Amino acid sequence: MTDSYTPPTVWSWNKDNGGRFANINRPIAGATHDKDLPVGKHPLQLYSLATPNGVKVTVMLEELLAAGHVGAEYDAWLIKIMEGDQFGSGFVAANPNSKIPALVDHSGASPVRVFESGSILLYLAEKFGAFVPTDPAKRAEVLSWLFWQMGAGPMLGGGFGHFYAYAPVKIEYAIDRFAMEVKRQLDVLDRRLGESEYVGGDAYSIADMAIWPWYGALVKGLVYDAGEFLQVQDYTNVSRWTDAIGARPAVQRGRMVNRVMGDPASQLHERHDASDFDTKTQDKLAPPPTDA
């Protein structure tokens, strides 16, 4: 292993040294352009993209609706992060950190902004009294796992995922360091799921909704194409749990919302009504093929 880089005394931004995401990464915050956010007909307005962090929230909203919480009806607007939508003035007002997802709740006297995916899950759980226990001990367990994901996730995504799949140069030390950590995290999760049906205990909760889009996708080979590299088949309890969560109809719907990749039948770019799943997926909106 060699190290040919010596950090300068003072760091300076090299705009071209960002790999796949160079056009949207920058060392400053704030808006780059004026653009208001659209507002639909429902109190809950979600601005997102179906990355794992975005999927957490759409799964939660669909689960709330499936459980009969009619107040959880929502509009989901597509934020195209590769085109810089997250730097529009309206989005920055909703989330000063310029990351998806962002939620604005218009159900009260004044709009309430909520950002960071874990914060949105907890806000919705408390608003509707669902998917988080009221018993103090059980609640503490669920929240511990929710925040476990929030702390562990960057090691998987920005750490392993970036250096293994996206970085313009393969750096052995970086990949080895983060692969070791991700396998440790998978072992933590596998051991927990060997003693409990769900991550937070015996009931499905926001902890499962937070963890499944990242670690479930990883063990199913849906992110970073790293299944063989990480030997994900070894984590049998995680696989069992992943399949059980993925079989839930609300999870299947939530995964479709704001999705712009994969099978056109799985892509619902924007969601404004429950009927959109039947009429507005990309396969139904696509024009018929033309004769050559």
Image (cartoon, rainbow, N blue to C red):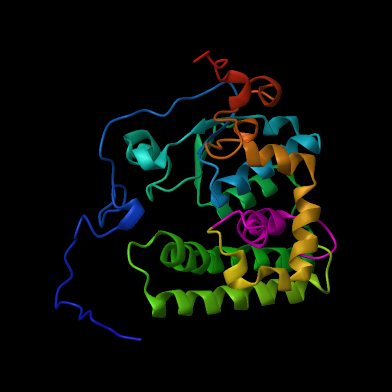
Q: Position of residue 66 (x, y in %)?
A: 79, 36
Q: Horizontally, is 52 left or right of 12 in the view?
A: right
Q: Position of residue 54 (x, y in %)?
A: 55, 46
Q: Does the magenta stretch include residue 5?
A: no
The tally of labels here is 0
Q: In which quarter of the image is the N terminus?
A: bottom left
Report the front residue among 204 and 181. Answer: 181
Q: What stretch is highlighted in magenta?
A: 200-223
Query: Can you see residue 110?
Result: no
Q: Is residue 215 magenta?
A: yes
In the figure, 6 relative to 285: above or below?
Answer: below
Q: Position of residue 120 (x, y in %)?
A: 58, 48
Looking at the rendering, which quadrant does residue 59 occupy? top right
In the figure, 116 relative to 75: above or below?
Answer: below
Residue shown at 34% from the left, 52% from the top: 21
Residue shown at 65% from the left, 45% from the top: 124
Q: Which residue lies furthest to the top in this view?
A: 291
Residue shown at 62% from the left, 74% from the top: 185
Report the front residue among 76 and 265. Answer: 265
